[in-house]
Amino acid sequence: MTDPSQSPAHSGFGRFFLPGPTEVHPDVLAAMTRPLIGHRGAEMSSLLEACDPVLRSLFRTRRPVYVASSSATGLMEGAVRNGVRRRALSLVNGAFSERFAALVTDCGREGERYEVPMGEANQPDEVYRRLRAGGFDAVTVVHSETSTGVLNPLTEIAEAVRRAEGETGDEILLLVDGVTTVGGMLVEAEAWGLDFLLTGSQKAMALPPGLAFGTASERMMARAATIPGRGQYFDLLEYDAYWRKHQTPNTPAVSLMYALAEQCRRIGAEGVEARAGRHWRMAERTWEWAQSRPGLALYAAEGQRSPTVTTIRVDEGMPASRICSEMTARGWTLGTGYGKLKDLTFRIGHMGDHTMDELDALLAALEEVLG
């Protein structure tokens, strides 16, 4: 049997540009080989305590950042169960915001959707208009829609929510999926007034899949305390009680916690601001390249582009799915278009620990494929 680690697609770090899971540095992978420890002992508490300041810096908050052994979808459900009392407005502009909206009704709450076509961003004025009608107690939004590479104007959306809240007298919590922005840009959980902000390990934080992270405002925690049926696995009150001891309420994925500790050390050494700047520079380099190539176009409009994932539309020449296949044959991994966009677009995940030199090598390989 062929060893997959010897295939062209696994020939070394810096060739895997999937927009999640992103590539994981060898030092982070190596950390997972440490022997297991008891997850209720002092050693685990010390490990998580060491991660705490870096996690707060990534989320731009003084509040705790909870660690769950789950995918980000788990904390999306937790956001709904703990933060939506009766009715939420869900902002939909792609596949993952659609999932967030579906979770609202799956958890037994009422949901209204404000939906725009894929490739577009949700507009703050429309958010305000809908909320001003009254009857909402929460809003769900995806900051960076991974399926399209569109970045929603989160600061303006947050302002619209607060304005509507002041006029209606309703307490409206803002629940945010930051899966491809936290760790990739400066997402200000506290300064922007986000009531719940979550991400997954396998995106801009460049960890293996299997962990999710979330921070909750005081308003969110107070709301959770009034909601029965929060469930057990994602009860934020339990997470808060355990995090005060630098523990998790459920058995953690210990080996992934080792990886987290190593990556927090690496992120701390680089600096969160420097990491965000690196992502923006890689994004701008990708946009510049795509705009210079005949037959290619950026799917997201100017001012609405994610710093961590770029979706590129193929207007002529070979189908996007074939471009990805040709790159795979050369030892590179890209993201195909999502769903109905499979043959129309391809995606470059320029996030995590990738460097500009690695990105330039990828773009040079794409030049060969495109001819």
Image: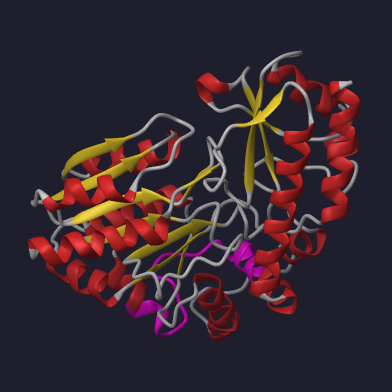
Q: Is residue 314 visible?
A: yes
Q: Is residue 358 left or right of residue 48?
A: right
Relative vertical location of residue 159 with respect to residue 349 in this rendering, above or below: below
Task: Identify the image quadrant of residue 338.
Answer: top right
Q: Residue at x 75, y 42 (%)?
A: 288
The quarter of the picture where the N terminus appears is top right
Q: Is residue 7 visible?
A: no
Q: Is residue 349 left or right of residue 13?
A: left
Q: How many marks?
A: 0
Relative vertical location of residue 263 with respect to residue 218 in this rendering, above or below: above
Q: Is residue 240 left or right of residue 203?
A: left
Q: Is residue 182 magenta?
A: no
Write the start and end of the magenta stretch as one range. Answer: 241-262
Q: Residue at x 73, y 35 (%)?
A: 291
* Coordinates of residue 34 in the picture (x, y in percent): 73, 68
Q: Observer-nearest residue: 129 or 87? A: 129
* Coordinates of residue 27 in the picture (x, y in percent): 80, 64
* Coordinates of residue 298 in the picture (x, y in percent): 63, 34
